[in-house]
Image (cartoon, rainbow, N blue to C red):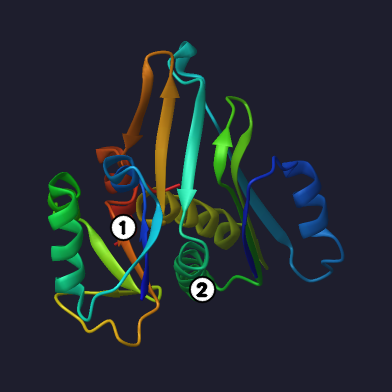
Amino acid sequence: MSVRLTFDPFDPGALLSEFTRGRTETGAVATFTGIARAEAGATVALELEAYPGFTEAEIRKIADGARARFGLDEFEIVHRVGKIAPGEPVVFVATAARHRRAAFEACDFLMDCLKSRAPFWKKEHGPDGARWVEPRDQDHADIARWE
Amino acid sequence: MARVLLFGRLSDVAGWRERSVDAPFLSALRAKLAGEDAALGEALAGKGVQVALDQVIVRGDAPLNAATEVAFLPPMSGG
């Protein structure tokens, strides 16, 4: 049950290998990897700011809710902070459950929560300067699916 | 002395991310910051800006005697 923020790039494949190791009763692992988009050159870098301690605690509350709701065996969430280049993974979510439906749904749910509720502040750096980003209407619509 | 933290666009408005401010109440701290920087005062009072005292969200005024960390959190963008 881990929630981790990192300033350094990470390898989603290595995280998945570690997460699946030794699971003789789990049956199902689902993962999602979010990758920074270049937006055809409009975004040179993404910058994510977190409130250390507070951000992890809020994500953990969301994840504990998902664990109870979907009966997860385990979850892992790794989120980049700081400056992120297009093509680099931003977020990795893995969920483990006895059966695939719970693992898929919990992963989907966690991403919708992270995109709409997680305490991050996001800045997009483009060729003409930087701008702060707020959740899109689509992010709010996505989270409303689960209510 | 409370350690004041600004996040997101608030630190761009203020030109700083962290500083120590002496104030007995959150309202007094807001007034002190607004007195020094009107644009920041307005931004801190803006829509959707939340305050966390020692990492716990509070609403309205609160004494700061026990709090060591006051964080102003503008609307969150999500991950």
Whether residue A55 is situated above or below residue A86 in the rendered picture:
below
Residue B49 is left or right of residue A29, and the answer is left
Residue A137 is left or right of residue A54, and the answer is left
Which of the two marks, 1 or 2, is nearer to us in this view?
Answer: 1
Could you tell me which residue is drawn at 81 percent across and 46 percent down? A14
Could you tell me which residue is drawn at 27 percent across and 52 percent down? B74
Element type at marker 1? Answer: strand
Q: Which mark is residue B53?
A: none
Residue A21 is left or right of residue A97, and the answer is right
Whether residue B14 is situated above or below residue A42 in the rendered picture:
below
- The answer to whether any part of residue B47 appears in the image is no
- The answer to whether any part of residue B4 appears in the image is yes
Chain containing mark 2:
A
At label 1, which amino acid type do we have? Leu
Separation of residues labelled 1 and 2 (CA atoms): 23 Å
Which corner quadrant of the image does residue B5 belong to? Answer: bottom left
Label total for image: 2
Q: Which mark is residue A64?
A: 2
Could you tell me which residue is drawn at 20 percent across and 59 percent down? B33
Foreground pick, B10 / A85: B10
| Residue A70, position as x, y percentages in the image | 51, 69
The answer to whether dots 1 and 2 both sit on one chain is no
Which corner quadrant of the image does residue A124 belong to? Answer: top left
